[in-house]
Amino acid sequence: MDNFFTRRLHNNFRKNETKLHILNYLFWECTWRCNLKCRHCGSDCKTNSAFPDMPFEDFLNSIQPLKREYPENSILIAIMGGEPLLRNDLAECGKKLRENGFRWGIVTNGYAYDEAMHSKLISAGMGSITVSLDGLQESHNWLRNNSNSFERAVKALELIVSYPRLNYDVVTCVHQKNLAELPALKEFLISKKIKNWRIFTIAPIGRAAENSEMLLTNEQTRQLMNFIAKSRQNDPRINLYFSCESYVGDYETKVRDSYFFCRAGINIGSVLIDGSISACPNIDRSFVQGNIYKDNFLEIWENRFDIMRNRNWCKTGICKNCKDFKYCNGGAMHLWNSDQACIMSCVAEKIGH
């Protein structure tokens, strides 16, 4: 089956998914506190956050209505921050989520993930974890602004890999300073028995907007796509794939398992630190759809999010006359700002598709 018919099938699938908008992945931004000060942070999180940690009962009460509409264990709660491991009650939160029929996992920098934490979270029913490793030691520590970050993250990964029932992936932010060492990083991850590796590039949001080294040039973007494609074709030792951030033209089936589909507001929602109801937490906060402190989460999910489920408004600027808009739909929502303008070129354009 050639790409034309495959893409048409994918378009029909995406339209059906959008119409049904079944929630299956829900982020909880439980804290804005963080133990690192990463150069690319989209949230600009700090040790002393402007917002207090959200009380767990507030979050749990807000998602109780979902139990009326969704089967038990059909929704995964991804607990994130800031750094979720800074919450003293993280294991207790996870245990209560499992008792209420929700699967859960965390997104972490791994700095505070030690044997005691690993044991507590596993005992509380944690089923998945994402850990960031952004290059070899020097470049990772540079990005994370901490000389011990690489060592701590690697130790976390060693604990995670030792527990085979835990779903995990390693995520790497690619930028100008670590692009050339991706082959060496791949071999390092394989030596640590890592099986799942997800790569993405950095958008000019948060702190990254102030640092030109964060953004790849067009040629560097092509180099990244070729590295992923070659690895996927020739190296079965690790499952490497490009994230869901952008449509990549002819590279689509070469760098990921399925065609690009931004599921923000379609299958992915979030409850942010101040109670705001949105989709992917990296999306501009102007796209918030409601707030758990005044709205019913289920009603908001069912009846709003039109701006994410009908993306025709994205046909502007570089997207206006794009022949592939029907496949891309304007790319990832986090690339659009409060003025509904795209803040960077899509990957397909950067690689000359």
Image (cartoon, helix red, strand yellow):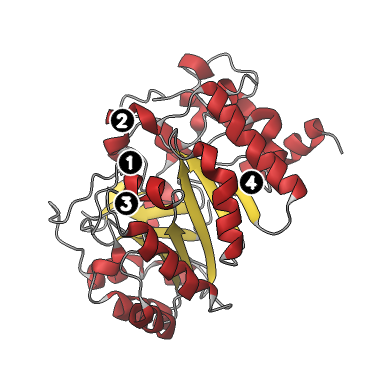
How far apart marks 3 and 4 lie (CA) works out to: 23 Å
Residue at the location (16% across, 56% down)? 47
Which of disc 1 and disc 3 is earlier in sequence? Answer: 1
According to the picture, the residue beneath numbered tag 1 turns out to be: 40
Most extreme residue toward the right is: 1
Rendered location of residue 241, percent (x, y): 62, 48
Residue 105 seen by the camera:
no
Nearer to us: label 1 or label 4: 1
Judge whether 191 appears above or below 263 on screen.
below
Dot 1, crowdedness within 10 Å: few (<14), some or many (≥20)? many
Q: Residue at x 40, y 78 (%)?
A: 118
Q: Which residue is mark 3?
A: 277
Which type of secondary structure does the marked residue at label 3 adopt? Answer: strand
Spatial separation of the CA atoms under disc 1 and disc 2: 8 Å
Q: In the figure, is residue 28 to the left or right of 198?
A: left
User: What residue did someone put label 2 on?
Assistant: 211
Rendered image: mark on residue 207: none
Q: Is residue 229 above or below residue 196?
A: above
Contact between labelled residues 2 and 1, with CB atoms less than 8 Å apart: yes
Dot 2 alpha-carbon crowd within 10 angstroms: few under 14, some 14 to 19, many 20 or more: few
Q: Earlier in the sequence, mark 4 or mark 2?
A: 4
Q: Is residue 71 above or below residue 297?
A: below
- Local packing at callout 4 (Cα closer than 10 Å; few below 14, some 14-19, many 20+) is few
